[in-house]
Image: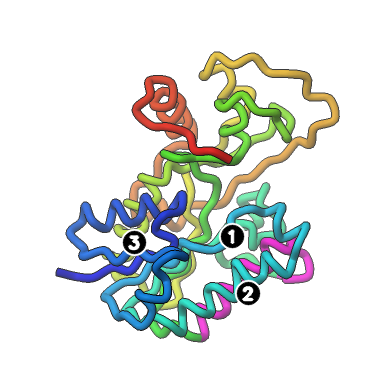
Amino acid sequence: MPRCIVIGAKGFIGSAVAAEAARRGYAVVPVDRANYGECAGQSADLLIQAGGNSRKHLDERNPAEGFALSVESVRQVLLDFHPRHFVHVSSGAVYPHEEDPARNREDAPLAPGGMTHYGFHKWLAEQLVRHYAADHLILRVGGCVGPGLRKNALYDLLSGGPSFVHPDSEFQYMDTRDLASAVFQLHEIGLASGTVLNLSARGTVSIRQAAAWAGVALSAAAGLPRRRVELDVGRAAALVPIPETADVVRRFIREVRDGSIHLGRD
């Protein structure tokens, strides 16, 4: 039975990855902060690095802490574990132009000076993976929804919390369960080491449209920033099935409303 180490196995994305690994017949080694020390040193056929910081505001407020969580932690994983194949879950935030698919294809030139602190830290972690992991795949992930969601504009909408973006803001959302499935499909294709792929759903949905589907009345939007995030996912879509963001969001709203999945606590 092949072994799969999942770093961040109790996290939002990592928990979905661990569940998908078990479903596919892997002997799963779930690693989190509590058991990291006892798991360090293990080898495996596959390691999926799904840990690290996902709170963009943290890096802007406290760059040193953000660096430790997103860069230093990845370096430690690379030194402490010995997999045959390393899959690194990175972020589309490495692109200074997350809003424009024509400017955030995988081959887009990246200037670290134009990145946010969060994006820069994610980019630095990718460089560590390139240096230390002989056989690796880097996935730059967009926005996500799924069981246990506890932050983003859609969470704010469905949980009744205050909104921090204008309702005409547009985002990509991929369900973590679909994301986990795509991660393993991409791994099993046997892509060349060093491959970098953007991974998210197709297209965008506005918060206004999501509110209409959810039957939620929007509050005043004066002064709220209008944002747009859309990664070019053409390369990944040519390799594995990629859902439409609209379908993902409608399903997610339906599952939250009927109680088949639950939101987490922020």
Magenta segment: does it hold 119? yes
SS for dot 2: helix
Residue 151 placement (x, y as % from top left): 58, 41
Residue corresponding to mark 3: 186
Residue located beneath label 2 in the image: 124
Please name the residue that numbered disc 1 is placed on.
Answer: 53
- Residue drawn at (39%, 58%), measured in percent from left and top? 9
The type of residue carrying mark 3 is: Leu
Residue 23 higher or lower than 50, as above or below = above
Q: Is residue 121 left or right of residue 18?
A: right
Is residue 21 found inside the magenta-colored segment of the image?
no
Task: Quarter of the image for the N terminus: give it.
Answer: bottom left
Tell me which segment is drawn in magenta. 111-131
Query: Hey, what amino acid is under mark 2?
Result: Leu
Q: How far apart are marks 1 and 2 (CA)?
A: 13 Å
SS label for mark 1: loop
Q: Who comes first in sequence, dot 3 or dot 1?
A: 1
Q: How crowded is mark 1: few (under 14 residues within 10 Å), some or many (20 or more)?
A: some
Look at the picture and state if 101 lies above or below 170.
Answer: below
Q: Tell me how far mark 3 sits from mark 2, CA to CA.
A: 23 Å
Q: Which residue is rendered at x = 56% and y = 37% of the image?
A: 204
* Amino acid type at image mark 1: Asn
Question: Alpha-carbon distance for marks 3 and 1?
Answer: 23 Å
Instruction: Identify the image quadrant of the C terminus.
Output: top right
Mark 2 closeness class: few <14, some 14–19, many ≥20 residues within 10 Å:
many
